[in-house]
Amino acid sequence: MTDSETPDLEKLNRELARVQDELIALSDDAFAEKFELQQRQDELRKQATAFQQDWDARRSNADLQRELAALRSQLGGIEDQKIDLAGFGGGSSEAGPGATGLGGVQLNQQMLEAQGANAVHARIGVIKGILADRGVDPD
């Protein structure tokens, strides 16, 4: 990314933050104002997505591979915090057979979502797609 692009991205992020702050400050019944701000927010998000895609396309394979390795490491750390379902619930089945295991699966899913695992998975997919398009094995 060149120096001339950085201010544009910073300006875009500031504008997104401003719009978000204005949305939060509006009363619940300010429907027209909310609609207008939400349209602006959507437009800014599209611009941010386009900027990210353009920026990724210009990055070197080595840079993308470094980010991919870091994201995989981050995801591994998140996954390491999952509940061990074999020991979950201490064998109690007061709620019925399999209920404790199901609860553990749900807790794990909620924890992964709260820690941003879905966003990390999505970013990994984007990088792998770029590398594959370039003929580079991402694995």
Image: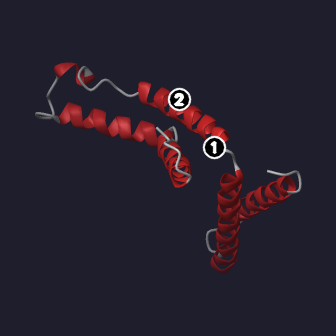
70 or 24, nearer to the observer: 70
Q: Residue 46 lies in what quarter of the image?
A: bottom right
* Disc 1 crowd, CA 10 A, few/some/many (<14, 14-19, 20+): some
Image side of residue 19 versus residue 4, left or right: left
Image side of residue 31 versus residue 104, left or right: right
Residue under the point 26% across and 24% down: 88
Q: Position of residue 120 (x, y in %)?
A: 52, 43
Task: State the residue position of label 1.
Answer: 61
Q: Position of residue 12 (x, y in %)?
A: 78, 60
Task: State the residue position of label 2.
Answer: 73
Q: Return the residue found at the far bottom.
A: 32
Three-letter amino acid code at disc 1? Asn
Residue under the point 50% across and 50% down: 132
Q: Which of marks 1 and 2 is nearer the N terminus?
A: 1
Q: What element carries label 2?
A: helix
Three-letter amino acid code at disc 2? Ser
